[in-house]
Amino acid sequence: MPELLDKITSPQDLRGLSTKEMGRMAKEIRQLIIDTVSSTGGHLSPNLGVVEMTLALHYVFDSPRDKIIWDVGHQCYTHKILTGRREEFSSLRQMDGVCGFPVKEESEHDVYNTGHASTALSAALGMATARDRKGEDHHIIAVVGDGGLTGGIAWEALNQIGHLRERLIVVLNYNEMSISPNVGAISRYLTYLVSGQYYLRMKDHAKTFLKAIPLIGWPMIKVGRAFEETIKKTFFPGLLFEEMGLRYIGPVQGHSLPSLVEVFEEAKGHDGPVLILCVTKKGKGFGPAQDNPSKFHSAVPFEKTTGLSRTTDKRPTYSSVFGRTAIELAEEDDRVVAITAAMPDGTGLGPFGERFPDRLFDVGIAEQHAVVFSTGLALEGFRPVVAIYSTFLQRAYDQLYHDVCLMDIPILFILDRSGIVPDDGPTHQGINDIVYLRHLPNMIVMAPKDENELRHMLRSALNYGHPVAIRFPKGKVCGVPMDQGWKEIPLGKAELLKEGKDLLLAFGNMVRPGLEAAELLAKKGIDLAVVNARFAKPLDEALIREHIRPGSTIITAEEGVIDGGFGSAVREFLDREQYFDLRFKRLGLPVEIYPVGKVEQIKARYRLDVPGLVAQIEDFYQGGKQS
Ligand SMILES: Cc1ncc(C[n+]2csc(CCOP(=O)(O)OP(=O)(O)O)c2C)c(N)n1
């Protein structure tokens, strides 16, 4: 039974505790996180790694007066537990429950909504600048991981932080991991700062050396800080953060409460930007997560004793079908290379990396760079396959337009987690991609109805000679039989699945529920032809023309926002061709902030599941408004 945690209703209550009691509290929090996440799923290993750091932050600083900004935000569970949401914590990731990321609307202690990486430093600098303009004196603390620091915006922020020199504190959580092991030169540099206490060793050697010098040795050591500076400058001219204008403190043992409290207190007194490098262990306190922090980065519900998943559904995911097909394609053509922005496992490219270690590039959390890097590869004859979650590719909109589409560069973009995304809330919804892609010149936008079609689409798309985006949802495949060979999917060709009087054009994973709905509606006298559109761009205009009769009804269905999406493409086509004598309805998602919940729950709420589709279409036939 938690004893200490029971007494905490706000961070203020921490102040009376000894560091020993805080240590006990850390244990209680860890247990609560493990108990909860084992049944709800969630970001287990990142959260277990920052329990002490969060306790120390709330002990030293005065939230919400002092503002703590969590980069990505996936590590905010202890923060939520300490800031009045302990009771609700059992509703983590449940429909309309506690969000796994900071949400301003949930608490005054969540000062900045996040979900996408590398934004905390920019937001913190903006807030620090505003604070000083307003003559206020609170502290601003940004907590960023070594993975978050591979994102370009973080460096844009550091550039300006070193320029403005506003008073703010950056806590850099170094655990050698992004979701997978962290990569890149920055990661290497941090490892160098931390590894073997190289700097401390140098200092000790230098002290021994100075002590040995008669008369002047000891006085020189006593000069203290000046001595340290000299050593740093002599042996570390590249101490990057100091050179950039931030006071650097570290490395600090990130699970030692006394050390953390001491350095946070020290940082509080500094009149400029400070960066504290904390070394933590991802997954700390739960063996399976410590041994495999990637697997437990965002865990599905698991058995607490073994860490084994509780899921019994053995079907593969869309991501793994993509990953397997990418290997097949790379075996056929040695120009095929794969690019991921810090998500080799999430995107299903892990096995590709094992099979072709030199042909998988993990660029870090750097979606913009991933796109332009691929442009360079493609211009020199390679065939890049770039796998990025739909929500994160939003980052690279300009690169898609400026670097890919204007030059009509053939790159295959894989938009994993398109459509409604479970568990993580509004920041992770993949519902905008059809809209942000379909108006780009030369861009082809596709979505398969099932995993078998995905496989054929991947191969066909590589040969279209243009940029292509293929979107598919998070989660398990439909379970259809897989063809052995390849089938060519001609560019812009849709597939008629069911004949009928009126027309239902469904895109991607709306095809199967659309078909089911049409069958149920047939029993109610509504006769719909069902088309698997396959392409949101280019549309199969010939097929649509063939199915239009005077007075007919056309319905579109997509798992994406309606405004500017697939249905809008159809509507624009009908307007261009002056088809006015028909009834038209777009089914999809409204433009709004989406709740946390499971896919089925969110689909049901927005009436995109089979009963919802039936109801919406029936309403429309009974005189519902066109839209
Ligand atoms: C723009 C963007 N790309 C990818 C992700 C997916 N993602 C979530 S957490 C994470 C790793 C973050 O690593 P780090 O900042 O070191 O935090 P840790 O999990 O190690 O505590 C990634 C890649 C994201 N949230 N945002």
Image: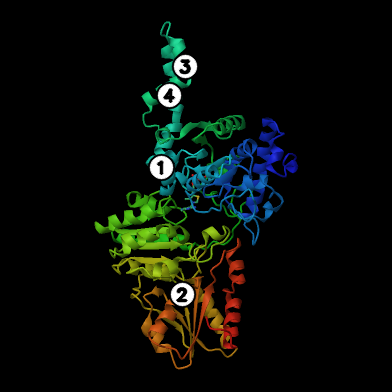
Query: Does residue 473 appear left or right of residue 231 in this picture?
Result: right
* Residue 387 placement (x, y as % from top left): 40, 58
For marks 2 and 4, give the CA distance.
Answer: 62 Å
Q: Is mark 4 within 8 Å of ligand 1?
A: no
For marks 2 and 1, give the CA distance.
Answer: 44 Å
Q: Residue at x 40, y 22 (%)?
A: 230
Q: Are marks 2 and 1 in contact (CB under 8 Å)?
A: no
Q: Amino acid at mark 1?
A: Asn
Dot 2: within a 10 Å radius of its alpha carbon, few (fewer than 14), some, or many (20 or more) residues? many
| Relative to 192, residue 492 above or below | below
For marks 4 and 1, give the CA distance.
Answer: 22 Å
Residue named by callout 1: 159
- Of the image marks 2 and 1, the number of the one nearer the N terminus: 1
Q: Which mark is residue 223?
A: 3
| Relative to 236, residue 606 above or below | below
- Of the image marks 4 and 1, the number of the one nearer the N terminus: 1
The quadrant of the rendering that contains the N terminus is: top right
Q: Which mark is residue 229?
A: 4
Residue 53 or residue 468, whichever sits in front: 53
For marks 2 and 3, give the CA distance.
Answer: 71 Å
Helix, strand or loop at label 3? It is loop
Residue named by callout 2: 507
Residue 305 seen in this snapshot: no
In the image, farthest residue toward the left: 380
Helix, strand or loop at label 1? It is helix
In the image, farthest residue toward the bottom: 550
- Of the image marks 4 and 3, the number of the one nearer the N terminus: 3
**Quarter occupied by residue 546:** bottom left
- Of the image marks 2 and 3, the number of the one nearer the N terminus: 3
